Amino acid sequence: MLEHVVKRYPGQKSPAVDDVSMTIPAGEVVVFVGPSGCGKTTTMRMINRLIEPTSGEITIAGRSALSINPDKLRRNIGYSIQQAGLFPHMTIAQNIATVPSLVGWKRKRIEARVDEMLDLVGLAPDQYRSRYPRQLSGGQQQRVGVARALAADPPILLMDEPFGAVDPITRGQLQDELMRLQSELGKTIVFVTHDFAEAVKLGDRIAVLGSQSKILQYDTPEAILANPADDTVEGFVGAGASLQQLTLLRARDVEMEHPPTVHENDAVDEIRRELGPRGDAWGVILDERNRPVRWVYRHELAHANDLHDVGEPIGETVSTQSTLRDALEALLMGSNASTAVTGQRGEYVGVVSIDTLVSAIQSIREEHEHDHDDSEQDGPDQDGPGRDGPRHERAESAESGEPQP
């Protein structure tokens, strides 16, 4: 909990952060979003005292953060930054082991934890533990940065624009990975970004910040999209509010389509039978690991002897954690009016079509119209922002006893 937190720097007339008060529920992802220079990173860094507040109170699980030794405080709060911030002279294993080593874990426990963390973020331990950061791609380095932040199992994780330095496709994959991890781990996460779409995708709640970290609106993504508090917040939402609605639903939330599938080593006659006589019928070719690799149409099979060279590459796929907006973007980049959906290990799950997306938008609109009608009848909610539980379906709740900054 932050209560009347202020940060003043010597020689500056105005405070960098002025009178910020908010409660961050345990087990939720709270995203600070705002323009560059508004103070969102400064506010977040005061939680673990990388920046000391000038005045005000920050409490974690009911205890004042200012009463805790700063080093001890930081060892119990994970921290992930842009471009990972890995130590270049250390191996990946040594980077991940940094905090567990500082808090006195035994060597065997650290080695087991390193492998566990690498596996958790989708990097094979045998392949990556002995490498150096320079030998990894930007996305892989960022995964290691998250693994390092989680290595000592902190209840709170601070993330300062961690995916801002990678390409859009890798960024979407990292966002999906974070949501998957959060569904398993249920951490309290404070995430800083200037990208409102990223905030909507990741956040259980969003704090839209103005100058000096003034809280312009603190609410669920659904509520902010439906009812921006003022013109500034509406500017963040942007003209594409309807498109942003697609960020509220995941691929797993909609009914996927299941066209015929076949493996590359299967007989051509098998998929011919599945597709039937229509020349425009289509299906999905899978590799030996059940990953989708190509779309195939009935007319392309007329003179085919095997399935290794027929069809069109599927290209970009989305995961079950991806939003419907991700699915739309992948669909627009592809050659089919559908996009393939994969599970945690890249295995084929189904497809989301343009018809699915149109139906989802219509359902969201109807739901919002119904909610708007109900709110007009019932009057405004006096209890402040909230909903039945986090969007990521965690087992933990705000009453679970986990720390609340």
Image (cartoon, helix red, strand yellow):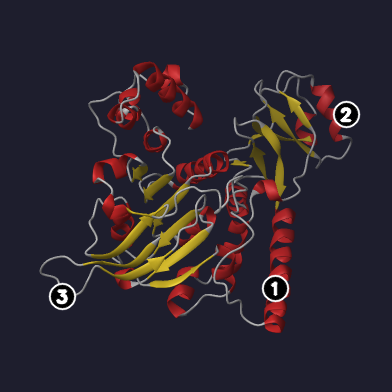
> Which residue is labeled 1 in the image?
371
> Quick one: SS at disc 1?
helix
Nearer the camera: disc 2 or disc 3: 3
- Disc number placed over residue 273 in the picture, else none: 2
Of the numbered discs 3 and 1, the one sitting upstream in the chain is: 3
Label located before the other in sequence (1 or 2): 2
Q: Amino acid at mark 2?
A: Arg
Residue type at the position of mark 3? Lys
Q: Earlier in the sequence, mark 2 or mark 3?
A: 3
Residue at (47, 22) in percent of width and height: 124
Say what secondary structure mark 3 lies in.
loop
Question: Residue at point 71% right, 59% down?
Answer: 360
Q: CA distance from mark 2 to mark 3?
A: 76 Å
Relative to 352, does residue 277 appear above or below in the rendering? above
> Percent position (x, y) of residue 284?
72, 34
**Can residue 163 be seen at all in this image of the molecule?**
no
Q: CA distance from mark 3 to mark 1?
A: 45 Å
